Image (tube, rainbow, N blue to C red):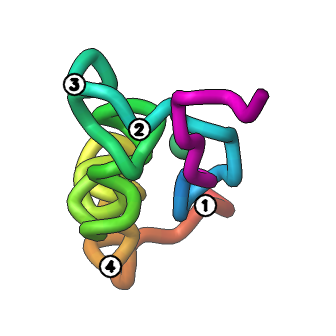
Amino acid sequence: MTDPITKVPCPTCKTLVPWAPKSTYRPFCSKRCQLIDLGEWASEEKRIAGAPDMSDGDGWSEDQ
Ligand SMILES: [Zn+2]
């Protein structure tokens, strides 16, 4: 007997995802992986971890 549930590898993390209605984000294993694939998660991370603006220290000297 073969397994009646087809499993597909998540395009992002390769986790096997059951191809079933309960797998809301198939072929992705989760919403997170779906967002990573779309590039949205990555851009959001950059916004959160954005480096502080270093360009305003040009005229400032530390040996005072
Ligand atoms: Zn995944």
Distance from the alpha carbon under mark 3 to that under mark 2: 7 Å
Q: Which stretch is magenta?
A: 1-9
- 10 Å crowding of disc 4: few (<14), some (14-19), many (20+): few
Q: Secondary structure at mark 1?
A: loop
Please say if the residues under marks 3 and 2 sit with CB atoms less than 8 Å apart. no
**In this figure, which residue is indicated by the disc labeled 3?**
21
Judging by the rendered image, the residue that carries numbered circle 2 is 19
Q: The disc labelled 2 sits on which kind of residue?
A: Trp
Earlier along the polypeptide chain: callout 1 or callout 3? Answer: 3
10 Å crowding of disc 2: few (<14), some (14-19), many (20+): some
Q: Which residue is mark 4?
A: 55
The residue carrying pointer 3 sits among few (fewer than 14), some (14 to 19) or many (20 or more) residues within 10 Å by Cα, namely: few
Q: Is mark 3 within 8 Å of ligand 1?
A: no
Instruction: Find the residue positioned furthest to the top.
Output: 22
Quadrant position of residue 54: bottom left
Spatial CA distance of label 1 from label 3 is: 61 Å
User: Relative to the observer, which residue lies in front, 18 or 42?
Assistant: 18
N-terminal of the pair, mark 2 or mark 4, is: 2
- The residue type indicated by label 1 comes to Glu
**Residue occupied by mark 1:** 62
The x and y percentages for residue 31 are 29, 34
- Mark 1–mark 2 Cα distance, whole angstroms, equals 60 Å
